[in-house]
Image (tube, helix red, strand yellow):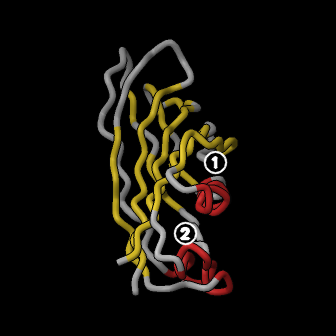
Amino acid sequence: MGIVFLVGCSTTPNSDKAYISNAAVPIKTGPITPERQEERAATEKVPDVKLAPPTTSGNLQPARLISFVRPVYPYAARIARQQGTVTVAIVIAKDGTVVKAKLVSATNDVFIASALDAVIQWKFRPATIDGVPVSITSAVPVVFTLE
């Protein structure tokens, strides 16, 4: 039994300029224990999450995921064969770190803690406008699916 996590981003900058973009990339894995989570995250390729080019008055380069921590599939949910999606609003700082993660919605509460714990540890190449790093907000869906 394998597990698929879909990770995507849609962003809006913390400014008067508005834009929308989104992406979803499947991340496949087999059963993983919490002890092996860090080991696998360190050795696996970071998924290529690209944000569509936004419309702004400047030359904006979107944030790009460069390092991620895979969410742990809750044991009880795996045994019960439960699946779900957690949408998390994050703030990506000018240095590419996630400085805030807040629950937007969840189809199943059992996945909330795992999604929040993982997403807050992700690292991004920061978004830039005209070459200057900017802080942005992003809505990130984390989809927990059993294969």
SS class of the residue under badge 2? loop
Crowd class of label 1 (few under 14; some 14 to 19; many from 20; radius 10 Å): some
Name the secondary structure under disc 1: loop
**Image disc number at residue 97:** 1
Q: Would you identify the image quadrant in which residue 35 lies? A: bottom right
Type of the residue with mark 2: Arg
Q: Look at mark 2 in the image and give the residue it sits on.
A: 70
Image quarter hosting the N terminus: bottom left
Q: Which mark is residue 17?
A: none
Disc on the earlier residue, 1 or 2: 2
Which residue corresponds to the image point at 47% horizontal and 55% vertical from the top-left? 85
State whether residue 50 is above or below residue 16. Answer: below
Residue at the image position 61 percent from the left and 38 percent from the top: 91
Q: Position of residue 129 (x, y in %)?
A: 45, 27
Q: Nearer the viewer, mark 1 or mark 2?
A: 2
Query: Residue 81 appears at what percent x and percent y?
Result: 46, 76
* Furthest-front residue in this view: 80
Vertical arrangement, residue 102 with respect to residue 132, above or below: below
Q: Residue at x 40, y 50 (%)?
A: 8
Depth order, front residue of 130/146:
146
Q: Which of 13/110 is in front?
A: 110
Residue 117 in percent (x, y) is at 67, 59
- Drawn side of residue 143 relative to residue 93, left or right: left
